[in-house]
């Protein structure tokens, strides 16, 4: 039988039983109501009329009032005859009353009339008792029939309650379990419903689907194995080391080059946790040290080049950690299924970078000597003892002097950059006076401020602690800040120099009122060779980058804030002598 037919039959039968129970209840209640109404309407009224006639008789029938009252109730009684023998008793009462009217003082007739009334009351009381017994029997029969019908409905409802949900829910539960098994790639799962309803049809369709999936899995296993071999061969023939981990950080694969540089074998690493391997292999430990950072684990990250001895020489590799995330079929949330660690061999580029750095250092160093000679010759030409210069010659001297100064500054920046790139920055950090550093930077830019009539406004507290800094390099950074501020400030403006104690450290700030920096370039301002597009000002784009390296090499921080159109504030913070004593 179909499920729909079962539901219609079960619910329909319950509905029919409820209708039957309702009709039966209405029938018996109506019958009981009629029996009760007969008692109340017929017999009760006769008793009331009889009582009123007795009262009137006792008042004195010879009086007009009681006489009229007696006649009215007698008339009502004559119209309310319902019982067998009641008419004869009523007629006798009427005849005796007529006799009494002829003989008003006849006490014997009054007693006869009282007896007639009493007989009528007794007859109706017996009728009430009889009808009450009948009503009781009707009530008992009603209770029996309604209880029987209710019990039958309860049994049927209980049977439907226990059987119908199970007939529907159990096959659905079994089917759901089987679907989960199929989702877990257990394609041998089958559903067995020995029924000829919709569930039977569903089970047949499900089993057919499972059989086809099992055939598909078996038929494609060889193809999948071939694809796996192809991918493994591709990874093993890559020139860069590649390490694959699963979601539990167990090694899935390490290509040949990664095994070679780490001195490991595939049998000793495949399927093992990478942290266990890292405990016994320094190279693996260095490679995976960023992998256990929760922040890096969730996103693709690159780190600074790693130096590894490979190919009989020191080689440089750029490490990249790539998390593998997928959204499983039928789900909405992304799930991490593994991680790939890539090591790109950048040794050739690093060698070229070293060559470039050495070339720039050599050229810059070699240029400093002739530029210094040019400046010395300019000083001799400016000496009046050598000879007087006319106005045009003096103008040429100034131009040559300005170009020589620019060349000397560029070569100085290039030499500093070669120190930064080669990692040979030499720091001489000692307790220094912040006021002396500021005075040096101000004096170094004095001539530039005079040309644009710019003023410096310096604010330094008198009780400021000593700053732990390399005087030369810190002064160079502050000089560069002031030089940039002068370059981008308007004529007759003011540049503010502030030195203050901030959270136990010394903060140097240079604020100008120039055009400011567009927000889109703020994050790039400290990058090497970066210059704001469209600017006509001269520069190599190295000054701020070198400044950042110098400050960070001293354990400090560098920062910039800019209000586009209203000026910029460059600042750096260094440790103070007071803070250093507290740490000690």
Image (cartoon, helix red, strand yellow):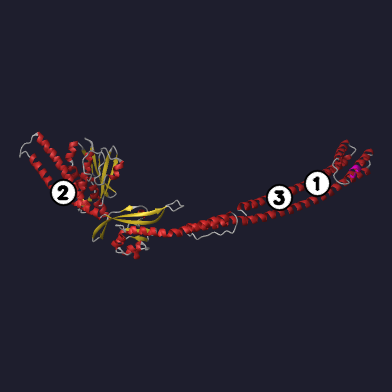
Quadrant in which residue 447 is drawn: top left
- Foreground of the two, 149 or 358: 358
**Residue 39: numbered disc:** 1
Q: Which mark is residue 363?
A: 2
Mark on residue 266? none
Of marks 2 and 3, which one's residue comes earlier in the chain? 3
Secondary element under disc 2, as helix, strand or loop, is helix
175 is higher (above) or lower (below) than 42 = below
Q: Quadrant of the C terminus?
A: bottom left
Residue 309 visible in rendering? yes
Callout 2 touching callout 3 (CB < 8 Å): no
**Considering depth in this image, is 400 or 353 the residue closer to the camera?**
353
Q: Are marks 2 and 1 in contact (CB under 8 Å)?
A: no
Residue in front for this viewpoint, 444 or 345: 345
Q: For residue 318, what is the image quadrant?
A: bottom left
Tell me the SS state at disc 1: helix
Q: CA distance from mark 2 to mark 3?
A: 113 Å
- Residue 425: x %, y % from top left: 20, 53
Q: Residues within 10 Å of mark 2 (few under 14, many from 20)?
A: some
The stretch of residues the image draws in magenta is 88-92
Reading the chain from its start, which is encountered first: label 1 or label 3?
3
For image coordinates 29% across by 45% down, the residue present is 523
The N terminus sits in image quarter: bottom right
Q: Quadrant of residue 278?
A: bottom left
Q: Considering only order in the chain, which callout, 1 or 2, is on the residue closer to the N terminus?
A: 1
Residue situated furthest top in the rendering: 391
Where does residue 520 sit, x and y in percent of width and height?
A: 31, 42
Q: Is residue 231 left or right of residue 413?
A: right
Task: Estimate the spatial distance between the alpha carbons at disc 1 and disc 3, rounded to whole Å.
Answer: 29 Å
């Amino acid at each position: 039988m179909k499920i729909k037919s079962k539901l219609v039959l079960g619910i329909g039968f319950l509905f029919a039983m409820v209708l039957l129970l309702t009709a039966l209840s209405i029938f018996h209640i109506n019958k009981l109501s009629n029996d009760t109404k007969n008692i109340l309407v017929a017999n009760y009224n006769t008793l009331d009329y009889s009582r009123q006639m007795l009262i009137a008789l006792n008042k004195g029938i010879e009086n007009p009032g009681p006489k009229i009252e007696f006649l009215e109730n007698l008339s009502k009684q004559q119209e309310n005859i319902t019982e067998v023998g009641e008419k004869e008793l009523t007629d006798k009462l009427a005849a005796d009353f007529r006799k009494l009217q002829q003989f008003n003082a006849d006490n014997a007739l009054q007693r006869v009339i009282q007896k007639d009334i009493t007989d009528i009351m007794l007859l109706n009381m017996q009728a009430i008792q009889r009808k009450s017994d009948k009503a009781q029997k009707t009530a008992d029969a009603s209770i029996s029939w309604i209880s029987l019908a209710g019990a039958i409905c309860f049994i049927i409802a209980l049977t439907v309650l226990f059987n119908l949900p199970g007939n529907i829910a159990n096959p659905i539960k079994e089917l759901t379990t089987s679907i989960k098994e199929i989702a877990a790639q257990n394609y041998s799962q089958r559903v067995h419903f020995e029924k000829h309803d919709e569930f039977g049809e569903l089970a047949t369709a499900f089993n057919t689907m499972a059989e086809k999936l099992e055939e598909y899995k078996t038929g494609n296993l060889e193809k999948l194995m071939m694809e796996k071999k192809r991918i493994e061969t591709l990874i093993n023939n890559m020139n860069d080391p590649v390490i694959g981990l699963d979601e539990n950080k167990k090694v899935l694969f390490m290509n040949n080059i990664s095994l070679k540089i780490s001195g490991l074998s595939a049998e000793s690493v495949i399927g093992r946790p990478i942290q266990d391997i890292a405990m016994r292999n320094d190279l693996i430990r260095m490679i995976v040290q960023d992998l256990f950072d929760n922040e890096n684990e969730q996103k693709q990250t690159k780190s600074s080049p790693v130096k590894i001895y490979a190919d009989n020489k020191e080689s440089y590799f750029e490490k990249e950690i790539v998390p593998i995330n997928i959204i499983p079929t039928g789900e909405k949330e992304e799930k991490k299924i593994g991680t790939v660690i890539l090591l790109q061999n950048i040794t050739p580029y690093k060698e070229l970078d070293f060559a470039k750095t050495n070339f720039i250092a050599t050229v810059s160093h070699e240029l400093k000597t002739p530029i210094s000679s040019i400046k010395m010759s300019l000083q001799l030409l400016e000496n009046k003892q050598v000879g007087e210069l006319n106005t045009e010659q003096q103008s040429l001297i100034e131009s040559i002097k300005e170009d020589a100064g620019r060349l000397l500054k560029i070569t100085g920046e290039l030499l500093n950059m070669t120190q930064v790139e080669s990692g040979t920055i030499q720091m001489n950090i000692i307790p220094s006076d912040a006021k002396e550093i500021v005075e040096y930077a101000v004096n170094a830019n004095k001539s530039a401020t005079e040309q644009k009539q710019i003023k410096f406004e310096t604010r330094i507290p008198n009780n400021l602690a000593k700053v732990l800094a390399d005087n030369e390099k810190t002064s160079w950074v502050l000089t560069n800040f002031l030089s940039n501020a002068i370059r981008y400030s308007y004529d007759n403006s003011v540049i503010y120099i502030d030195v203050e104690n901030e959270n136990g450290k010394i903060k140097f700030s240079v604020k100008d009122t120039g055009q400011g920096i567009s927000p889109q370039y703020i994050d790039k301002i400290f990058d090497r060779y970066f210059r704001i597009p469209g600017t006509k000002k001269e520069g190599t784009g190295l000054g701020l980058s070198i400044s950042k390296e110098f400050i960070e090499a001293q354990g400090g921080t560098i920062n910039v804030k800019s209000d586009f159109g209203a000026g910029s504030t460059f600042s750096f913070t260094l440790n103070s002598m007071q803070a250093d004593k507290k740490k000690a």
